[in-house]
Amino acid sequence: MVDTKDGREDQAANEERRQREREIREARSRADEPEPPAIDWDEDADSPPVCHLRGCDEEATFVVLERYQEETGKGPVEALAFMCQDHADEESPTNLDHAYDDYVFRVDPLPGIFNAEST
């Protein structure tokens, strides 16, 4: 096969198409995986949790979950933090360098917090 500009462009287009097909197959195979378990928080506790960040004594209204691969590669780690509205707005993933197929970053409202305010 002669190396021509058209041939190289065709090879690049084929590789991009194969990569897209691989990504679609992988996404479909992960579609059946269960979601991480819901955060277990006792709505009937004497007092709601306080924001996780130092120096903040606001009531927590969100929980942040990040699941990533342990640095040693021996297994996943789940990090949970209860946060107030202001700090939850600023939260972003911190362990992307340890992301893997089951990586999760999620910010969820605490159960019952917003339901209680709407009644």
Image (tube, grey):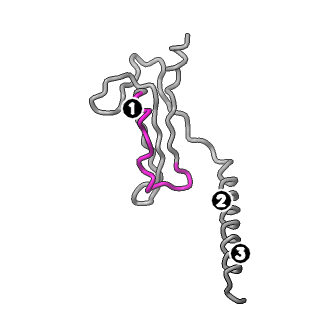
Q: Residue 114: x percent and y percent?
A: 52, 19
Q: Residue 12: x percent and y percent?
A: 66, 73
Q: Earlier in the sequence, mark 3 or mark 2?
A: 3
Residue 70 horizontal side relative to residue 112, left or right? left
In the depicted view, which residue is nearer to us: 112 or 20? 20
**Disc 3 to disc 2, C-alpha distance:** 20 Å
Q: Residue 101: x percent and y percent?
A: 56, 55
The residue that appears at 65% across and 52% down in the rendered structure is: 30
Number of residues whose C-alpha sits closer than 10 Å to that of mark 1, classed few (under 14), some (14–19) or many (20 or more) = some
The residue that appears at 69% across and 57% down in the rendered structure is: 24
Region of the chain picked out in magenta, as a range: 86-103
Under mark 3, the amino acid is Asp
Q: Residue 54's quadrant in the figure?
A: top left
Number of residues whose C-alpha sits closer than 10 Å to that of mark 3, classed few (under 14), some (14–19) or many (20 or more) = few
Residue identifier under label 1: 87
Label of residue 10 in the image = 3
Under mark 1, the amino acid is His
Q: Residue 116: x percent and y percent?
A: 52, 14
Residue identifier under label 2: 23
11 shown above or below 21: below
The answer to whether mark 2 and mark 1 are in CB contact below 8 A is no
In the depicted view, which residue is nearer to us: 5 or 118? 5
User: Outermost residue, front direction?
Assistant: 5
Say what secondary structure mark 1 lies in: helix
